[in-house]
Amino acid sequence: MTDFSDKLSVLRDFFGHVSFRDGQENIIDAILSSSDTLGIMPTGAGKSMCYQIPALMFDGITVVISPLISLMKDQVNSLIQSGVRAAYLNSSLTSAQYETAVANAKKGMYKIIYVAPERLCTPSFLSLARYVKISMLTVDEAHCVSQWGQDFRPSYMKIPEFLSQLPYRPIVSAFTATATAQVRDDIIKMLGLKNPFCLTTGFDRKNLYFGVMHPKDKYAQTRTLVKENSDKCGIIYCSTRKNVESVCEKLCEDGFRATRYHAGLSDEERRKNQDDFIYDRVQVIVATNAFGMGIDKSNVSYVIHYNMPKNIESYYQEAGRAGRDGNEAKCILLYSGQDVVTNRFLIENSNDNPDLSGEELEILRKKDLRRLKVMTDYCNTDRCLREYILNYFGENKGCTCGNCSNCSGEFEEQDVTVEAQKILSCIYRLHQRNLRFGGAVISQILRGTDNAKIKQFRLSELSTYGIMKDCTDVRIRQIIRHLTTNNYICEGDYQTLCLTRKSAEILMEKKPLTMRLPKKQERRDKTVSKSIPKGEISVFDKALFDRLRELRAKLAAEISMPAYIVFSDASLRDMCIKLPKTQAEMLEVSGVGKAKQQRYGKYFVAEILKYLKENPQTEKPSVLPEEYLKFGEGDSSTRLLKILSAGADRLESTDEELSLTQLSDRTLTQLGVTGDKRIIQNAFKDWLLSENYLSEQVINGRKQMRTTILSEEAGIYEAEKISSLGNTYTAVIYPKAAQDFIYANIKEITEMALIRGEQ
């Protein structure tokens, strides 16, 4: 009988955690009860621990089937650093290395062995499998077994054959990050899971921001996003090798540390480039979807999709490689209509599964085209993007998450019935002439544009010409996307627009149509923004954190491992808070198990003791220890403003040109605290408005900050920027001089904010 209490000891001793994440304990208990198991858990939810902990508690060996060499290598290295005896068997090993690993396995030297599915039924591996005791067979990335999944791999079909050739059947566990109900059922059927315990922990990743942009210049938008995250690591996914090469080359020319990854490179270059990214020698990797499956790099802060993927499953899995450390991260998709054309071509002309019959291939292509439609609708919906994704995976709940590009502002349902009728009528008039055009030309006709194409096809003679001349192109295109997403319009060849049967509901039956659009805000009499406290303020010693991070980098370089393999940022922050002074106290730090304590603990304890000796006043972790301790009362808004006032002398400007949001965020970092940056941002803004260094104007129904005659005195200026829809707009910029000016007036700024907060 398995002692389930041991699982907590294993979690603590090997992995350095004191509690399980959502769903982990349920799955582990099911496996320890000898039940076949299927776990569907989002990227970053801790799937690997669900099978690694039982593997360490079972008598025999656990065999883990993994699809990629890089994934196996990363997992095994991480396990070894945690004190777990593990190995992998794949084509990257020489014959001598492979034979040595097999011999060691037969001697019982490993608890976990990773193997590629292609190797399962080879004579050498079957010989090993029959010789040792296999307690559990774990199938990682289990969706690869389903031909309805996004990454079907015929080699996964060998798993049932392998099981049938063993002298006895071990427990079978399977895990995936993305699976619809159909794929889940297919996994159970194809793997032959017996009365499995199935658990879906939920697909929501609350720390991820989801955004869709429709830029006119994708590279310009990409460069802006990378620059805004210049101190962070990111992945840029492209659909073709050509795009990978082009984007990577341009980023390097613009001074960014970037590298590339795609199937056209040699194995050696792919391995080197991947290692450069994992070990933080470059900040950005530009890649096709050949990169990333199972890459356990926790500090990826953003994922940009330069091109739209073919389906939601692929998108969510790739986007989910951001924010695995639990910190806020961004997932931005840059959409263009050409992405749809490219993906449709790839679907209709690919034959990745030669083992399927012609009829099966046709069924699969139709399925892929339907999933492409769902992905396209995601890029054009006005719904909450998080809700859209969760609903697709079966979590049917309405929400306005406040953390996606469709929910980032105040929205309301607006009646667009008349505009929709005009758009549909224009398409109908074109059909009468046997003409079809895309959204751009439809908008030009409706707005009464006079250009070569309008003259060539005599489109100005249409009754719908110019009937929406007071409407912007952006709004017309938004409504067209809404009509397409809701099947009132369909796209034909070359993205031309056609009516559907459903069009008659609006054109003939006069059905009302609404869509979510930003509210038209009325200007308030007062310009004061009331800061809303959000959560508590957490304080850590940033100077100590930086020193521990340098130590971690040095130790990681010595063993040629990524820094997070030694300790995660979360562990370093916890060290800064708990200040362990002995090896025993080191075990109280989150993420520090016995193996890592024994291997690295002495170095970090020594560094902390050295820091405390140099800074004897540090009793609690903070840049301003004594001042911060005074602010234990009051709401978080009041406390943060007082901390800002106390830390004014330590704030330093940067040569970067920042927005007010970026300046507020950087101020928090310098203070060494985490809190709601809107409190600081509103304090800055309200003071600048009150002193007439900024003005607030209502332009096209929206409030905008603009400069005044006094702005030059404060170092503030305006600049033209490109919006997510590719339109230019005026932004207020805060260069070094403006930052210095604001920091010099912190005392007055915080005093005014505190007084207004009491009113």
Image (cartoon, rainbow, N blue to C red):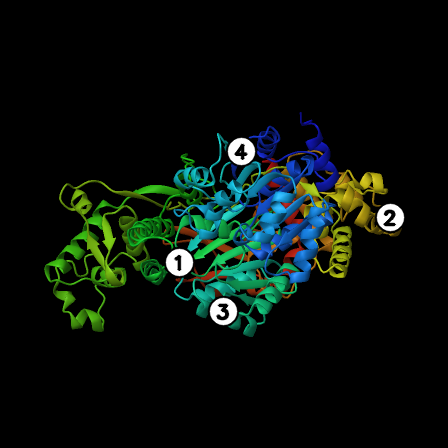
Q: Element type at marker 3?
A: loop
Name the residue tied to disc 1.
352
Please, what is the three-letter code of the amino acid marked with disc 1? Asp
Residue 402: % across, % down: 47, 42
C-alpha gap between disc 3 and disc 1: 17 Å
Q: Is residue 441 above or below residue 624?
A: below
Give the mark toward the camera: 2 or 1: 1
Specify which label sits upstream in the sequence, 1 or 4.
4
Q: Is residue 280 above or below residue 85?
A: below
C-alpha gap between disc 1 and disc 4: 30 Å
Name the residue tied to disc 3.
264
Q: How many marks are shown on the rendered structure?
A: 4
Specify which label sits upstream in the sequence, 2 or 4.
4
Q: Element type at marker 4?
A: loop
- Residue 595 is tagged as none
Q: Crowdedness of circle 2 by 10 Å Cα count: few (<14), some, many (20+)? A: some
Residue shown at the point (57%, 63%) measured from the top left: 284
Specify which label sits upstream in the sequence, 2 or 1.
1
Name the residue tied to disc 2.
609
Residue 564: % across, % down: 68, 52
Direction left: furthest residue: 432
Q: Crowdedness of circle 3 by 10 Å Cα count: few (<14), some, many (20+)? A: few
Specify which label sits upstream in the sequence, 3 or 4.
4
C-alpha gap between disc 3 and disc 4: 39 Å
C-alpha gap between disc 2 and disc 1: 58 Å
